[in-house]
Amino acid sequence: MSDKPKFLVWAHIRSMSNMFLRSFESRPGFGCLSSPILAASMFGEERNFTLYKDSIIVPGFTYKDCIKSVEDFEQKEEHDYIFIKENYYAIHKAEYPKKDLIPKGYRHGFIYRNPNNALLSLQRMCVMDKRELNYELVEATLNYEELYKLYHYVVDNHIDKEPLVINSSFLAESPVEYFKAICKFWNLEYTDAMINMDPEKPTCLNQFPISYLSGDSVWRKDAAKSKSWHKETQYDFVTRSKCISEDVLKFMDRQRMYYDKLNELAICK
């Protein structure tokens, strides 16, 4: 196990987590990975992600294979720091103890977004990807309760006694202030590179496995070319439409309680 400073941030879908990764990727000395364990749950031999149950199985992507690839990445001498962005749903339904699927020796973070903004963003992504926004997709990938439970699992099992909690909607409003607080929390020096990203710099968002998981999706390409954070309009509600069904809206209403609980833990209110 590497003794380099290592950071692992858990996210739900459409949480602006790829932008967050790009901010760290823009720092000198940081080696970054996007969704290395999600590969096992989506298209590996032990996959548990039912949304992809009919897609081809790719040999060599067991959970152990994916954890080993992370450990190998940690050993690369060109990296002084390691940063991983992973989705909570990579592990929450796996048939292994979560502790065995969480890379060792990391400081942990949890990033989430205003649920209404996240849902509308997911709806736009589904339109671009020509797929249906249904209850199964939302329950699996936009579940604030599961993200909150994973936070407590990390704390209760002494994996990280004080994880970082980030509301990306607040971060987008005041990125300099928020990133200074994040850097102080993780004992890092703040740099303006975190809010002024170089779109020409190579990014792990263009590398396997995230490139395989998302294909030619516009959302991944946009994140890979990000230059800076932008304040977004905060939506207080989402109305029912032909694209967003009543069962999805009711599910998201139930998630509001966990969004509020995460806000109580967030580094910046």
Image (cartoon, rainbow, N blue to C red):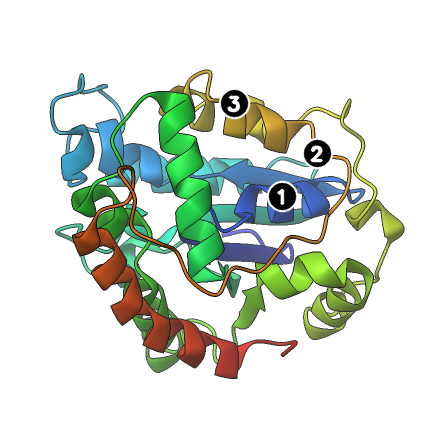
Q: Which amino acid does label 1 sit on?
A: Met
Q: Could you say where residue 151 lies in the image, as x and y percent from the top left? A: 39, 71
Residue 9 drawn above or below residue 72: below
Q: Which amino acid does label 2 sit on?
A: Ser
Q: Residues within 10 Å of mark 2 (few under 14, many from 20)?
A: some
Residue 148 drawn above or below residue 47: below
Left or right of 132? Residue 88 is right
The numbered mark at residue 19 is 1
Q: Residues within 10 Å of mark 1 (few under 14, many from 20)?
A: many
The numbered mark at residue 226 is 2
Q: Could you say where residue 131 lies in the image, as x and y percent from the top left? A: 28, 26
- Which residue is nearer to you in this view: 36 or 257? 257
Distance between mark 1 and mark 2 Cα atoms: 7 Å
User: Disc 1 or 2, which lies upstream in sequence?
Assistant: 1
Residue depicted at x 42% and y 23% = 128
The numbered mark at residue 218 is 3
Question: Circles 1 and 2: CB distance less than 8 Å?
Answer: yes
Question: Circles 1 and 3: CB distance less than 8 Å?
Answer: no
